[in-house]
Image: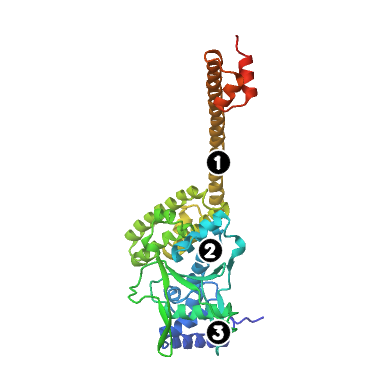
Amino acid sequence: MQTTADNPETLTKQQQVASQLVKLINNISTDQLKDLIRALEPIFDTNESISHLLGIPEKKVKKLGQRDRVKLDAILKRLFESSPRMFLGTIDDLYKTNYRNQYLSGELTDADITFLSTEAIRDTFRFEVLRADIVIKIKDSYYQIELQTSHDNMAIRFARYGLEIGINNLSINPETGVYKIQIPEQSVIFLENNKNNPRPNHYEIWWKNEKVAGIQVKELKLWELNIQDVFNRKLYNLLPILIFEYRLKLSEVENIPSELEHLKNSFLSDTKNILSQISLLTDEIADRDIDLVISVLGELIMYFDSSFFGGSIERIGEFKMTFSEQISGYREEITQTKENLKIFMEKVSSVQQELSKVQQEVATAKLEGKIETLYTECEYTSKDISNKLDISLDFVEEVISKLNI
């Protein structure tokens, strides 16, 4: 049976098509090439396959594609798939609320917190889909959080997101009987400072040449934080992405082996430092949150390893890449720490009980001494002693009965 590869005529046609495709690629704009690459990504498993098909370098496919960005977005969004004890501190920091304390006190419950759909399909010719990162409702308030790799202007996107989120969750105002479209409070967490953004992300809504509302977009810049800031401000779900500051640095030196190796060592050192700090959070967040922090950190390490280090971290074994083992190891460490703390507290409790017993005995002895003095030297009656010392008559008479008089 003759295959396509054995048929010279078919092979020639394929070569002609490939040649025409390469010529076409050379004559299209960067934006068109970007759209083409992104359309091919769901079809092909690797950038290498797209590179061969289009006849362009794999690095260019990676740069114009969004495979890594989509994967990275999914990793980052997992940080809000945690318990409220872990992410409410970040909400509080962005919006100046007090939800975490309310949650710990029981004033705010899980039922008060709802993650809403992040997709809004606009009824346009192409049925354009807008995808926000995180949309959350806490009691009657709505919040939108975007995780942004580049420090660029997002005001127009926020205006679109805000309106679509409001429409998705609209209600009827009982006082007026008209639609109530509530634009969420909005914020952006910038992961790296790779572009100057002189214009703020705030925007204004005008009607009949008059400003109806001014929307303030809160900002949190990751490169301005360190581990101590995360702990002090209770930004616990942002702990794993502190290593993101290395992405821009590594991009600038990826073709300079000596500097890349130096940054790699620094990257590994900081990553291990973050891991060593996680056990300090056992009283602040749930065990599953600690697992999530370690897991996300592991995925980010693999992302950096694949993007900048050619898989050398995993290949050489410079870091434990089996994060189920890593989680297990830290779980044992955390469990042992909790057990040691429990034993210590039991010892403290035992000492406190013994001390309390001694103090009670001393107090009783002093009281018995007073009763003896009042009875033998001052010739008080039992009733007089009871009234003077404000103690029971039965106790006074019991003490007197034991006196050798």
* Residue 134 in sight: no
Q: Distance between the residues labelled 1 and 3?
A: 53 Å
In this rendering, the answer to whether 388 lies above or below 16 is above
Amino acid on which disc 3 is placed: Arg
Q: Which of marks 1 and 2 is nearer the N terminus?
A: 2
Label 1 crowd bin: few (<14), some (14–19), many (20+), radius 10 Å: few
Residue under label 2: 80
- Asked which quadrant contains residue 32, the reply is bottom left
Q: Which residue does the image show at 61% across and 22% down from the upper left?
A: 383
Q: Which mark is drawn over residue 122? A: 3
Circle nearer the N terminus (3, 2): 2
Q: In the rendered image, which quarter contains the C terminus?
A: top right
Label 3 residue SS: loop
* Image coords of residue 128 (percent x, y): 54, 84
Nearer the observer, 65 or 13: 65
Q: Residue at x 51, y 51 (%)?
A: 284
How are the colours assigned in the image? rainbow
Q: Do the residues labelled 3 and 2 touch (CB within 8 Å)?
A: no
Q: Name the residue under label 1.
A: 336
Q: Residue at x 47, y 88 (%)?
A: 20
- What residue is at 35 percent from the left and 72 percent from the top? 195
Indicate the amino acid at tag 1: Gln
Q: How far across and down, in percent of the image, does residue 135 sit?
A: 53, 71
Whole-percent x, y for residue 79 in the image = 52, 62
Tell whether 56 sits left or right of 283. Answer: left
